[in-house]
Image (cartoon, coloured by chain):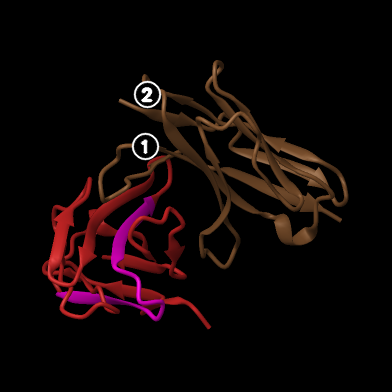
Chain colours: A red, B brown
Amino acid sequence: EAQVTQNPRYLITVTGKKLTVTCSQNMNHEYMSWYRQDPGLGLRQIYYSMNVEVTDKGDVPEGYKVSRKEKRNFPLILESPSPNQTSLYFCASRKTGADEQFFGPGTRLTVL
Amino acid sequence: AQTVTQSQPEMSVQEAETVTLSCTYDTSESDYYLFWYKQPPSRQMILVIRQEAYKQQNATENRFSVNFQKAAKSFSLKISDSQLGDAAMYFCAYRRSNAGNNRKLIWGLGTSLAVNP
């Protein structure tokens, strides 16, 4: 089954404790992206990647890191999480040149 | 800057009835794309329908159709014969035709649709 998976689905952590949210797709898509979804602010792009070893900032990259060492994986790293990073996070992927993005199921992150 | 506005935060419809969700956008571009995405309670976003601005014909996907009014910058989604599984948050999104490789989408804030049995 073609899909984008994210782990964990839910995470409660404390300020300053480094964490990684994994994202993996099995559709051989070149493009991957991370979004955060907040009430009243909608979906905002954090980082995106056009292909392996090619990443770029989205609209709200501060406090986040990403890497793209393999085509299928695009982890989101929070080196020192803060409460303002409490949010719902989505990973998405698509083929180069296509419009349809395939989204993961989301990760609900709470930073205390 | 482009913006997307969904003026109805919440709507409801009776099962088997028809409902229309509104979306307006602001742009100075003449060529662009518009989308409706669905986010059910499972949270996974799914593309419902896509419209190219240079096409006069309104896009249709089974029970979902759009009313694209380019001059009015309006892009409403009509759901016919509503089903319980249509209950979800619906997002309208816009992108410029020359949005670069990122193909960045501008998102509305969503409309929560409830379907009553």
Nearer-the-camera pick, A73 or A79: A73
- Residue B23 placement (x, y as % from top left): 56, 31
Ranked by sequence position, the earlier of labels 2 and 1 is: 2
> Cβ–Cβ below 8 Å for labels 2 and 1?
yes
Q: Is residue B74 left or right of residue B61?
A: left
Is-magenta flag for residue A19?
yes
Q: Chain of mark 1?
A: B
Is-magenta flag for residue B8?
no
Task: Please name the amino acid that badge 1 sits on.
Answer: Ser
Residue drawn at (14%, 53%), measured in percent from left and top? A62
In the figure, residue A74 lies in which quadrant?
A: bottom left
- Residue A26 placement (x, y as % from top left): 40, 81
Q: Which residues are magenta?
A: A18-37
Q: Is A71 situated above or below A78?
A: below
Residue drawn at (64%, 41%), measured in percent from left and top? B59
Q: Is B5 situated above or below A5?
A: above
- Residue A44 placement (x, y as % from top left): 32, 48
Q: Main secondary structure of the magenta part?
A: strand
- Same chain under badges 2 and 1? The reply is yes
